């Protein structure tokens, strides 16, 4: 049974608050997949919605020998393929007018000279006053060179100095604790932490942001949000797609680095954190950090009991993948947070590719009732514990399962649900994660970006697991069929605790 919930009255921020200050957004890696699929569609929508002013400029930088018109043609083709809705000619013209391009090698100082003079022209033409947002949409191996050259060319100004300059860095930030530290140290040589925006696009998803609003703008849930009432928590990110053309990248990452270390831990932090003192970026990020510090570190003797890895059949035939690859494409983990609120409550994390359904969801399974008052055993057996599910994607919404009397002359109990769907409550699809994140970076709001200490804390937790796997590579790969729910052992992980994964 579904209960319709509507937003009354519909809430939208006044337009002016959502506008970004005019700036030049410089995208390194402008010919790449991320730029085409995500960044340009997001920027286009921001411009069409008026969140990017007509003064703002978007400058692509890549090796391809395009001119500005060539770049515009590429972007137009990308929008035709990836924009979530049609491209109105008027919106396209307005956006195209803001696009520019500098071609060159990232290592070559001449590229930065050209960029500097182009940016100076744009400052004059568009009244930008030197504000810069650089987006490193390149493989991490290019970050050091680009940052060093930007610094050398005087294109990044010191923090707290006007005009501002900021840098967005794409994940993965390293591949273990040591490399993450090295990369962060390198970044810190050029940038202050306040100028560094490490992106994890999950944090830009409406439904992920709503985790905080749901917890801290309602008074009825928070008192239940702890070990006294919560039996266990599930967090899953299941995908139907395989690695596609990203085999080479994926061989070096695997599901633990690609999804668990970043996306799932970010979500887990939002679910498990204490209420921050204020809504400031650093208060929130400080509370998330404490969760990461509370994650229980399993030793070599216990990792195996709490971790199941899988690889889909056919993965080894994907382009760029080795024929005897032991890279996991699926992981199920049982994780504990050793703190006052969550001691003893298992968090079951599950993520993988080529699975039966695309679904990302958090569910809190509440304790069973302590005593059944309805006499008959068959009635009592039908009382299922309450479940609160936060559906991150698709079919975004919030679902609460509870027991109810089935109408009739006898006492019979059934399970019903209240189900809020974003599309019904607010109308339309929620905005794309990259829209919000780009806007926030331009506005200088770092709340939804990962701070250095948190990135390192998450690597500190997962690196021993990765080391363990390196020393004890899985021997049963491939071990699940495409279109299934993952390897059989994942079910056992739950069964051992007398539980089962939620049906999604
Ligand atoms: C990326 C991963 O960070 O997130 C991909 O590298 C994954 O492997 C993607 O497919 C999932 O994001 P979304 O927004 O489609 O759930």
Image (cartoon, grey):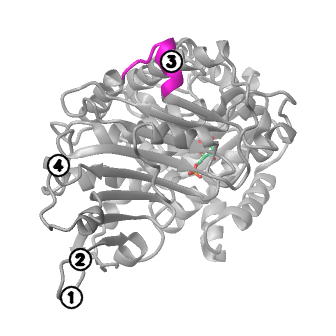
Q: Which mark is residue 224?
A: 4
In space, the residues marked 2 and 1 are separated at their CA atoms by: 8 Å
- Mark 1 sits on what residue? 408
Q: Nearer the viewer, residue 412 or 187?
A: 412
- Mark 2 sits on what residue? 412
Indicate the quadrant containing the N terminus: top left, top right, bottom left or bottom right.
Answer: bottom left
Q: Place residue 342 in its image quadrant.
A: top left
In space, the residues marked 1 and 3 are separated at their CA atoms by: 65 Å
- Mark 3 sits on what residue? 184
**Labels 4, 3: front one:** 4
Q: Is residue 20 magenta?
A: no
In space, the residues marked 4 and 3 are separated at their CA atoms by: 38 Å
In space, the residues marked 3 and 2 are separated at their CA atoms by: 59 Å
**Labels 4, 2: front one:** 2
Magenta span: 296-305
Q: Residue at x 31, y 32 (%)?
A: 288
Magenta span: helix, strand or loop, mainly?
helix
On screen, residue 142 above or below 370? above
Q: Nearer the viewer, residue 274 or 279?
A: 274
Q: Nearer the viewer, residue 444 or 337?
A: 337
Assess whether mark 1 and mark 2 are in contact (beta carbons under 8 angstroms): yes
The percent position of residue 30, horizontal first and vertical second, equals: 71, 43
Element at label 4: helix
Q: Is residue 301 magenta?
A: yes
């Amino acid at each position: 049974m579904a209960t319709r919930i509507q937003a009354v009255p519909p809430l939208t921020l006044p337009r002016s608050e959502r506008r970004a200050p005019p700036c030049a957004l410089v995208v390194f890696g402008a010919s790449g997949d991320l730029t085409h699929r995500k960044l340009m569609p997001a920027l286009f929508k921001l411009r069409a919605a008026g969140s990017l002013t007509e003064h703002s400029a978007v400058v692509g930088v890549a090796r391809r020998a395009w001119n500005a018109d060539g770049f515009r043609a590429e972007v137009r083709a990308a929008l035709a393929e990836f924009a979530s809705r049609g491209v109105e000619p008027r919106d396209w013209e307005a956006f195209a007018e803001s696009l520019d391009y500098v071609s060159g090698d990232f290592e070559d100082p001449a590229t930065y000279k050209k960029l500097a003079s182009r940016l100076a022209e744009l400052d004059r033409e568009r009244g930008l006053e030197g504000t810069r947002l650089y987006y490193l949409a390149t493989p991490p191996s290019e970050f050091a060179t680009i940052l060093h050259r930007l610094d050398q060319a005087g294109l990044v100004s010191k923090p707290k100095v006007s005009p501002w300059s900021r840098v967005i860095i794409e994940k993965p930030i390293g591949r273990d604790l040591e490399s993450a530290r090295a990369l962060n140290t390198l970044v810190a040589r050029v940038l202050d932490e306040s100028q560094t925006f490490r992106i994890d696009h999950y944090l830009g998803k409406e439904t992920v942001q709503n985790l905080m609003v749901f917890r801290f703008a309602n008074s009825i849930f928070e008192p239940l949000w702890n070990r006294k009432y919560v039996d266990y928590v599930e967090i899953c990110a299941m995908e139907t797609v395989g690695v596609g053309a990203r085999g080479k990248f994926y061989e070096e990452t695997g599901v633990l680095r690609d999804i668990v270390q970043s996306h799932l831990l970010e979500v887990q932090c939002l679910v498990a954190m204490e209420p921050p003192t204020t809504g400031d970026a650093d208060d929130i990020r400080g509370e998330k950090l404490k969760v990461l510090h509370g994650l229980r570190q399993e030793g070599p003797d216990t990792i195996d009991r709490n971790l199941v890895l899988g690889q889909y059949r056919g993965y080894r035939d994907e382009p760029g993948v080795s024929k005897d690859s032991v890279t996991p494409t699926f992981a199920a983990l049982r994780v504990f947070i050793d703190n006052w609120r969550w001691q003893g409550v298992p968090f079951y994390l599950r993520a993988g590719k080529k699975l039966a359904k695309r679904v990302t969801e958090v569910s809190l399974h509440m304790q069973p009732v302590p005593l059944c008052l309805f006499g008959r055993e068959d009635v009592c057996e039908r009382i299922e514990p309450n479940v609160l599910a936060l559906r991150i994607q698709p079919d975004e919404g919030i679902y609460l399962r509870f027991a109810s009397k089935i109408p009739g002359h006898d006492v019979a109990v059934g399970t019903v649900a209240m189900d809020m769907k974003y599309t019904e409550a607010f109308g339309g699809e929620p905005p794309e994660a990259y829209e919000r994140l780009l806007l926030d970076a331009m506005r200088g709001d770092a709340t939804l970006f990962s701070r250095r200490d948190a990135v390192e804390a998450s690597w500190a937790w997962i690196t021993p697991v990765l080391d363990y796997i390196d020393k004890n590579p899985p021997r049963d790969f491939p071990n699940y069929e495409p279109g299934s729910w993952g390897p059989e052992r994942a079910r056992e992980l739950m069964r051992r605790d007398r539980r089962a994964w939620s049906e999604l």
